[in-house]
Image (spheres, rainbow, N blue to C red):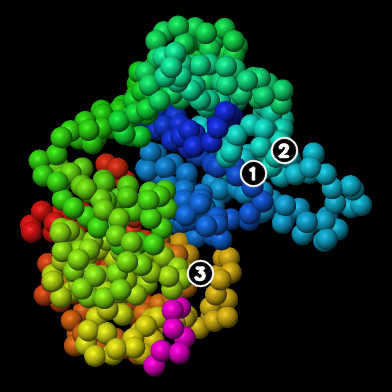
Amino acid sequence: MNALAKPVKYVFVTGGVLSGLGKGITAASIGNTLKARGLSVNIQKLDPYLNVDAGTLNPAEHGECFVTRDGAETDLDLGHYERFLDVQLTRNSSVMSGRIIRKLIDDERAGKFLGQTVQLVPHFTNAIMDAVISAGKGFDVHIVEIGGTVGDYESPAFFEAIRELGAVVGLENCLYVHVVYMPYLSTSKEIKTKPAQNAVRDLRSMGILPNVLVARSEVPTNGSTRTKLSAFCGVPEAGIAILPNARTVYEVPLTLEEQGIAEFIVKKLDLKTKKPNLKEWEKMVDSIVAIPKVTKKIGVVAKYMDNQDTYMSVFEAIKAASWAHDTGIDIQWVDAENIKSPADAKKYLQKLDGIVVPGGFGARGVEGKILAAQYALMNKLPYLGLCLGMQVGVIAAARLSGLKQANSAEFDASSPDKVIDTMHDQAGKENTGGTMRLGDYPCVIAKDSISARLYKRTNITERHRHRYEANNDYLDQYESWGIRAVGTSPDGSLVEMIEAIDHPYFVASQFHPEFLSRPNVPHPMFSGFIESLLKK
Ligand code: GLN
């Protein structure tokens, strides 16, 4: 590709009517269909709310905090982007107002504005445009999703920025996609387009005319809906995608393709492409919707119950591994706070085929997770520990071997046996943003471990997000506790993975393997977990 000769094409994805429509899935799916045509695609989320990053957002409300390879704490939509595009993004793909405002204020204090009045327009909007342009550099297409919906209090400057960008780079290089919702009235059995019309009007009032309309609905619609939307929203029928609820989110790229949306986009942006190659993706969707041969019960021992978004990448990783093994999964939430004794652990876990202990922060529910890990160790129940899940695995093994007060400094700073402890440079920074071991770190795996067999190699790199580490003072006791540190940092100073000795599958990592799982390429640790359930 000759980046100098060809202008970058921008696809802006905005939303109206309500949030939670799958705007991120839509943006990712558009990217998927463009990438399937041989184009190089980057993708970016602009989040208007005032946080600097997603690190301090409550996961129960906001969903998972996704971590990029370079250690940015971002919105969970980046996880969708990575899974749909099979790429590894960087912090450039996540822009929140707080980060831009902080830079503007720093620059203002440093006198960089030379006495100017610093304003939302042009200074804030210019900074947004700069972030978009610099992320898109060198790609054929750059997809930019704006979080929230048109009309939110925080967002006008973002809409103004993408409008202006159209003028700066030329409207022929930009395409605006608006994702809207059509409610279904069961009393009159009809789909209503009025809220969608209003949402398009809101967008037009900001000076943006959508080229593509993606209309979500909960039920299938008939042809007249498209005609009506086209007439009232000023978008040609060929640019309208109707997306009823899909069987799986991974079907969305195929639905867009069927409706000719990628072709419409390619034509509008005058892109030269290959024929789309979606064969592998189609095969994957077939395997996702196929009826599995067997179904296994997996317990997720956690404290944020009932909101799958909180553990989005974990669930996607479990599912990807299950699809690859033709296995149905019945995921059961186990509220860690309900496990107060070994008898409780037995009560909640004995009917399960395996358990996953995902990441987490804070003391609430942690004793229940430790009891669950002890149950898994004693009863040879398959166990997959992710970050906190490894830490409670170490604590569980230590306690079973007699160190009754073993704990993490995070939960009991006065414990005589802090088998999990603060990293020296992080002391005193608890409960603050951006003070963790974040992003990619290398790990070396012991040759004779389950993990080495699963990864099929011994040098790996995985993403991190944690403040505490296994305390090396206890390493030489591990074998007597029935566990091994099978993965460490290359210099041996940090424990990255543990396995239980003489156990069918007790594998846990200090890193978050779920971020590297792809729907069509399951992660080795998750694959191994599903395999161990099938052997039971
Ligand atoms: N709370 C633990 C730590 O900070 C684990 C973090 C996690 O699970 N992401 O080290």
**Who is closer to the viewer here, 316 or 105?**
316
Q: Which residue is mark 3?
A: 436
Type of amino acid under label 3: Met
- Whether residue 374 sits left or right of residue 518 in the image: it is left
Q: Which residue is mark 1?
A: 48
Q: Residue at x 59, y 13 (%)?
A: 233
Q: Position of residue 485 (x, y in %)?
A: 26, 77
Q: CA distance from mark 1 to mark 3?
A: 24 Å
The outermost residue toward the right is 115
Total numbered circles = 3
Q: Which residue is mark 2?
A: 157
Q: Earlier in the sequence, mark 1 or mark 2?
A: 1
Q: Residues within 10 Å of mark 2 (few under 14, many from 20)?
A: many
Type of amino acid under label 2: Ala
> Is residue 433 highlighted in magenta?
no
**Who is closer to the viewer here, 345 or 109?**
345
Q: Earlier in the sequence, mark 2 or mark 3?
A: 2
The outermost residue toward the left is 535
